[in-house]
Protein backbone atom coordinates (compact mmCIF):
# COMPACT_ATOMS: atom_id res chain seq x y z
CA UNK A 1 0.00 0.00 0.00
CA UNK A 2 1.33 3.44 -0.96
CA UNK A 3 2.38 5.79 1.82
CA UNK A 4 0.29 8.98 2.07
CA UNK A 5 2.07 11.98 0.55
CA UNK A 6 1.84 14.82 3.08
CA UNK A 7 2.62 18.51 2.60
CA UNK A 8 5.44 18.15 5.17
CA UNK A 9 7.06 15.45 3.02
CA UNK A 10 6.81 17.66 -0.07
CA UNK A 11 8.28 20.58 1.89
CA UNK A 12 11.17 18.43 3.20
CA UNK A 13 11.97 17.19 -0.30
CA UNK A 14 11.88 20.76 -1.61
CA UNK A 15 14.26 21.93 1.16
CA UNK A 16 16.65 19.06 0.48
CA UNK A 17 16.70 19.40 -3.31
CA UNK A 18 15.68 22.98 -4.15
CA UNK A 19 13.18 21.63 -6.69
CA UNK A 20 9.67 23.14 -7.01
CA UNK A 21 6.71 21.82 -4.98
CA UNK A 22 4.86 20.31 -7.96
CA UNK A 23 7.82 18.22 -9.13
CA UNK A 24 8.56 17.16 -5.54
CA UNK A 25 4.98 15.88 -5.13
CA UNK A 26 5.23 14.04 -8.46
CA UNK A 27 8.56 12.44 -7.47
CA UNK A 28 7.16 11.28 -4.10
CA UNK A 29 4.13 9.73 -5.82
CA UNK A 30 6.32 7.92 -8.34
CA UNK A 31 8.55 6.74 -5.46
CA UNK A 32 5.54 5.69 -3.34
CA UNK A 33 6.46 8.11 -0.59
CA UNK A 34 10.10 6.98 -0.24
CA UNK A 35 12.14 10.16 0.36
CA UNK A 36 15.54 8.81 -0.78
CA UNK A 37 14.05 7.24 -3.92
CA UNK A 38 12.29 10.54 -4.68
CA UNK A 39 15.64 12.36 -4.39
CA UNK A 40 17.21 9.80 -6.73
CA UNK A 41 14.34 10.28 -9.18
CA UNK A 42 14.85 14.06 -9.22
CA UNK A 43 18.61 13.70 -9.60
CA UNK A 44 18.20 11.26 -12.47
CA UNK A 45 15.83 13.74 -14.14
CA UNK A 46 18.60 16.36 -13.86
CA UNK A 47 16.52 18.60 -11.59
CA UNK A 48 18.22 18.09 -8.25
CA UNK A 49 21.90 18.57 -9.00
CA UNK A 50 21.90 20.96 -6.05
CA UNK A 51 20.87 18.29 -3.54
CA UNK A 52 24.29 18.11 -1.87
CA UNK A 53 25.15 21.73 -2.53
CA UNK A 54 21.93 23.23 -1.17
CA UNK A 55 23.37 23.82 2.29
CA UNK A 56 26.54 25.56 1.14
CA UNK A 57 26.83 29.21 2.08
CA UNK A 58 26.19 31.75 -0.65
CA UNK A 59 27.91 35.05 0.16
CA UNK A 60 28.79 36.35 -3.29
CA UNK A 61 26.41 37.46 -6.01
CA UNK A 62 24.87 40.32 -7.92
CA UNK A 63 21.95 42.74 -7.70
CA UNK A 64 20.24 43.62 -10.98
CA UNK A 65 17.40 45.94 -11.98
CA UNK A 66 15.08 46.02 -14.95
CA UNK A 67 12.29 48.39 -15.88
CA UNK A 68 9.56 49.23 -18.34
CA UNK A 69 7.13 52.14 -18.44
CA UNK A 70 5.06 50.98 -15.47
CA UNK A 71 7.27 48.69 -13.37
CA UNK A 72 10.75 48.48 -11.90
CA UNK A 73 12.20 45.19 -10.66
CA UNK A 74 15.25 44.67 -8.45
CA UNK A 75 16.56 41.16 -7.69
CA UNK A 76 19.51 39.59 -5.90
CA UNK A 77 21.01 36.20 -6.72
CA UNK A 78 23.82 34.63 -4.72
CA UNK A 79 26.59 32.14 -5.42
CA UNK A 80 29.38 30.67 -3.29
CA UNK A 81 32.26 32.43 -5.05
CA UNK A 82 32.76 35.68 -6.91
CA UNK A 83 34.22 33.64 -9.79
CA UNK A 84 30.77 32.09 -10.41
CA UNK A 85 28.95 35.38 -9.71
CA UNK A 86 30.93 36.92 -12.59
CA UNK A 87 30.19 33.99 -14.92
CA UNK A 88 28.01 34.79 -17.94
CA UNK A 89 25.69 31.84 -17.21
CA UNK A 90 25.00 33.21 -13.73
CA UNK A 91 24.45 36.73 -15.11
CA UNK A 92 22.08 35.41 -17.80
CA UNK A 93 20.10 33.56 -15.13
CA UNK A 94 19.64 36.73 -13.06
CA UNK A 95 18.81 38.75 -16.19
CA UNK A 96 16.14 36.18 -17.16
CA UNK A 97 14.70 36.26 -13.62
CA UNK A 98 14.37 40.06 -13.76
CA UNK A 99 12.80 39.91 -17.23
CA UNK A 100 10.32 37.26 -16.06
CA UNK A 101 9.40 39.31 -12.97
CA UNK A 102 8.83 42.40 -15.14
CA UNK A 103 6.32 40.42 -17.20
CA UNK A 104 4.56 38.47 -14.44
CA UNK A 105 4.90 40.82 -11.43
CA UNK A 106 5.17 38.03 -8.81
CA UNK A 107 3.79 38.63 -5.32
CA UNK A 108 6.76 36.86 -3.68
CA UNK A 109 9.99 34.98 -4.32
CA UNK A 110 8.10 31.69 -3.83
CA UNK A 111 5.50 32.77 -6.41
CA UNK A 112 8.26 33.57 -8.93
CA UNK A 113 10.12 30.30 -8.27
CA UNK A 114 7.05 28.22 -9.21
CA UNK A 115 6.27 30.11 -12.43
CA UNK A 116 6.97 28.46 -15.81
CA UNK A 117 10.19 29.93 -17.22
CA UNK A 118 9.27 32.22 -20.14
CA UNK A 119 11.95 30.79 -22.49
CA UNK A 120 11.07 27.14 -21.75
CA UNK A 121 7.63 26.65 -20.23
CA UNK A 122 8.30 22.96 -19.50
CA UNK A 123 10.39 24.00 -16.47
CA UNK A 124 9.85 26.43 -13.61
CA UNK A 125 12.20 29.24 -12.63
CA UNK A 126 13.30 27.07 -9.68
CA UNK A 127 14.12 24.17 -12.00
CA UNK A 128 16.00 26.60 -14.25
CA UNK A 129 18.01 27.63 -11.14
CA UNK A 130 18.86 23.95 -10.56
CA UNK A 131 20.06 23.58 -14.14
CA UNK A 132 22.41 26.53 -13.57
CA UNK A 133 23.62 24.87 -10.33
CA UNK A 134 24.32 21.74 -12.37
CA UNK A 135 26.22 23.71 -15.02
CA UNK A 136 28.31 25.80 -12.61
CA UNK A 137 28.78 23.33 -9.74
CA UNK A 138 27.91 25.80 -6.98
CA UNK A 139 24.89 26.49 -4.83
CA UNK A 140 22.93 29.37 -6.37
CA UNK A 141 20.09 31.07 -4.57
CA UNK A 142 17.56 33.72 -5.50
CA UNK A 143 17.74 35.77 -2.32
CA UNK A 144 15.18 38.55 -2.75
CA UNK A 145 13.10 40.42 -5.27
CA UNK A 146 11.08 43.63 -5.25
CA UNK A 147 8.49 44.63 -7.82
CA UNK A 148 8.05 48.42 -7.72
CA UNK A 149 4.96 49.85 -9.38
CA UNK A 150 5.87 53.23 -10.80
CA UNK A 151 3.83 56.31 -9.90
CA UNK A 152 2.96 58.47 -12.94
CA UNK A 153 4.18 61.64 -11.19
CA UNK A 154 7.47 60.19 -9.91
CA UNK A 155 11.03 59.84 -11.23
CA UNK A 156 13.26 56.85 -10.51
CA UNK A 157 17.03 57.09 -10.29
CA UNK A 158 19.04 53.86 -10.42
CA UNK A 159 22.71 53.66 -9.45
CA UNK A 160 24.70 50.42 -9.69
CA UNK A 161 28.07 50.36 -7.91
CA UNK A 162 30.95 47.84 -7.68
CA UNK A 163 29.78 45.97 -10.77
CA UNK A 164 26.35 45.20 -9.36
CA UNK A 165 27.39 44.41 -5.78
CA UNK A 166 25.46 47.47 -4.59
CA UNK A 167 22.34 48.93 -6.22
CA UNK A 168 20.35 51.96 -5.10
CA UNK A 169 16.96 53.13 -6.36
CA UNK A 170 15.55 56.52 -5.36
CA UNK A 171 11.98 57.61 -6.06
CA UNK A 172 11.33 61.35 -6.32
CA UNK A 173 7.75 62.56 -6.29
CA UNK A 174 6.59 65.67 -8.15
CA UNK A 175 7.80 65.20 -11.73
CA UNK A 176 8.01 62.20 -14.08
CA UNK A 177 11.14 63.19 -16.02
CA UNK A 178 13.79 63.93 -13.40
CA UNK A 179 15.77 60.65 -13.39
CA UNK A 180 19.00 62.69 -13.36
CA UNK A 181 18.22 64.30 -9.99
CA UNK A 182 17.01 60.96 -8.58
CA UNK A 183 20.26 59.29 -9.71
CA UNK A 184 22.38 62.01 -8.05
CA UNK A 185 20.61 61.22 -4.77
CA UNK A 186 20.96 57.47 -5.41
CA UNK A 187 24.74 57.97 -5.69
CA UNK A 188 24.65 59.80 -2.36
CA UNK A 189 22.70 56.90 -0.76
CA UNK A 190 25.32 54.44 -2.07
CA UNK A 191 28.12 56.46 -0.46
CA UNK A 192 26.50 57.52 2.83
CA UNK A 193 24.22 54.55 3.60
CA UNK A 194 21.34 56.30 5.42
CA UNK A 195 19.11 54.12 7.62
CA UNK A 196 15.94 56.19 7.25
CA UNK A 197 14.43 58.77 4.93
CA UNK A 198 13.38 61.26 7.64
CA UNK A 199 13.41 61.54 11.48
CA UNK A 200 9.73 60.49 11.79
CA UNK A 201 10.77 57.04 10.53
CA UNK A 202 13.29 56.42 13.34
CA UNK A 203 11.76 53.82 15.70
CA UNK A 204 11.02 55.02 19.26
CA UNK A 205 13.36 52.37 20.75
CA UNK A 206 16.30 53.66 18.64
CA UNK A 207 15.64 57.24 19.80
CA UNK A 208 15.32 56.09 23.43
CA UNK A 209 18.65 54.27 23.16
CA UNK A 210 20.38 57.37 21.77
CA UNK A 211 18.88 59.50 24.57
CA UNK A 212 20.06 57.02 27.19
CA UNK A 213 23.60 57.06 25.76
CA UNK A 214 23.58 60.88 25.50
CA UNK A 215 22.41 61.30 29.13
CA UNK A 216 25.08 58.88 30.35
CA UNK A 217 27.78 61.10 28.80
CA UNK A 218 26.65 64.33 30.54
CA UNK A 219 26.04 63.22 34.12
CA UNK A 220 26.62 65.70 36.92
CA UNK A 221 25.68 68.83 34.96
CA UNK A 222 22.65 71.06 35.77
CA UNK A 223 19.33 69.63 34.47
CA UNK A 224 18.61 72.51 32.03
CA UNK A 225 22.07 72.16 30.46
CA UNK A 226 21.75 68.37 30.30
CA UNK A 227 18.44 68.64 28.40
CA UNK A 228 19.96 71.04 25.84
CA UNK A 229 23.03 68.83 25.30
CA UNK A 230 20.88 65.68 24.99
CA UNK A 231 18.55 67.40 22.49
CA UNK A 232 21.59 68.47 20.45
CA UNK A 233 23.04 64.95 20.46
CA UNK A 234 19.71 63.42 19.39
CA UNK A 235 19.41 65.94 16.54
CA UNK A 236 22.97 65.13 15.45
CA UNK A 237 22.11 61.41 15.48
CA UNK A 238 18.95 62.00 13.38
CA UNK A 239 20.91 64.15 10.90
CA UNK A 240 23.47 61.37 10.53
CA UNK A 241 21.03 58.49 9.89
CA UNK A 242 18.27 60.27 7.90
CA UNK A 243 18.77 60.81 4.18
CA UNK A 244 17.13 64.22 3.89
CA UNK A 245 19.33 65.72 6.67
CA UNK A 246 22.67 64.26 5.58
CA UNK A 247 25.25 66.58 4.02
CA UNK A 248 25.00 66.05 0.27
CA UNK A 249 28.02 64.02 -0.81
CA UNK A 250 28.70 66.14 -3.95
CA UNK A 251 28.36 69.47 -2.10
CA UNK A 252 28.59 69.31 1.68
CA UNK A 253 27.56 72.96 2.04
CA UNK A 254 23.95 71.74 1.61
CA UNK A 255 21.88 68.83 2.91
CA UNK A 256 20.19 66.37 0.55
CA UNK A 257 16.88 68.13 1.22
CA UNK A 258 18.40 71.52 0.39
CA UNK A 259 19.92 70.12 -2.82
CA UNK A 260 16.47 68.83 -3.80
CA UNK A 261 14.87 72.19 -2.93
CA UNK A 262 17.37 74.00 -5.21
CA UNK A 263 16.51 71.58 -8.05
CA UNK A 264 12.77 72.06 -7.41
CA UNK A 265 13.14 75.85 -7.53
CA UNK A 266 14.92 75.66 -10.90
CA UNK A 267 12.24 73.32 -12.18
CA UNK A 268 9.36 75.35 -10.79
CA UNK A 269 7.78 72.24 -9.23
CA UNK A 270 7.85 70.93 -5.65
CA UNK A 271 9.90 67.74 -5.36
CA UNK A 272 10.21 65.28 -2.50
CA UNK A 273 11.93 61.94 -1.92
CA UNK A 274 9.21 59.33 -1.55
CA UNK A 275 11.46 56.38 -0.73
CA UNK A 276 14.74 54.62 -1.48
CA UNK A 277 16.06 51.06 -1.78
CA UNK A 278 19.70 50.26 -1.03
CA UNK A 279 20.58 46.62 -1.74
CA UNK A 280 24.06 45.32 -1.07
CA UNK A 281 24.93 41.70 -1.86
CA UNK A 282 24.54 39.56 1.26
CA UNK A 283 22.97 42.26 3.42
Image (cartoon, helix red, strand yellow):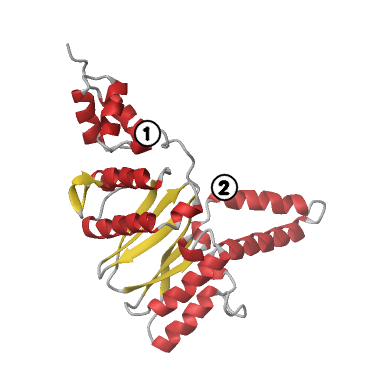
Q: Horizontal and vertical percent for residue 13?
A: 31, 29
Q: Secondary structure at mark 1?
A: helix
Q: What is the quadrant of residue 54 in the picture?
A: top left
Q: Is residue 162 left or right of residue 275?
A: right
- Percent of width and height locating residue 122: 17, 45
Q: Is 158 left or right of 206, judged from the image as shown? A: left
Q: Residue at x 53, y 55 (%)?
A: 202
Q: Percent position (x, y) of residue 218?
A: 78, 54
Q: Quadrant of the N terminus?
A: top left
Q: What residue is rendered at 44% in x and 86% in y? A: 265
What residue sits 65% from the left and 64% below the top? Answer: 236
Q: How many marks?
A: 2
Q: Nearer the viewer, residue 193 or 104?
A: 104
Nearest to the observer: residue 225 or residue 40: 40
Instruction: Using residue 225 as the reference point, say whether residue 271 is left or right of it.
Output: left
Does residue 162 sit above or below 48 in this rendering?
below
The kind of secondary structure element at disc 2 is helix
Mark found first going from the N terminus, 1 or 2: 1
Badge 2: few (under 14), some or many (20 or more) residues near its Cα, within 10 Å?
few
Is residue 31 visible in this depiction of the protein? yes
Q: Residues within 10 Å of mark 1 (few under 14, many from 20)?
A: many
Q: Is residue 283 visible?
A: no
Tell me the distance, in whole angstroms, between the alpha carbons under discs 1 and 2.
43 Å
Circle number at residue 51: 1
- Judging depth in this view, the residue of 210 and 8 nearest the camera is 8
- Check contact, mark 1 vs mark 2: CB within 8 A: no
Q: Nearer the viewer, mark 1 or mark 2?
A: 1
Residue 36 image offset from top left, x and y in percent = 32, 22
Residue located beneath label 2 in the image: 205
Splitting the image into 4 quarters, where does residue 224 fall?
Answer: bottom right
Amino acid sequence: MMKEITSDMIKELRERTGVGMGKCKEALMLSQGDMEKAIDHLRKAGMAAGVKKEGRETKEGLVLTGEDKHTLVVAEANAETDFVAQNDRFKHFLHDVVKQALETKPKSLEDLAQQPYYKDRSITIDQYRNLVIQALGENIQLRRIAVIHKHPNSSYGIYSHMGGKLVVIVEIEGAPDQEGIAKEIAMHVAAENPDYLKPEEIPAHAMAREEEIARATVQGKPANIVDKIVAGKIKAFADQVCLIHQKFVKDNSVTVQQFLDICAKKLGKPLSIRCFWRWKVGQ
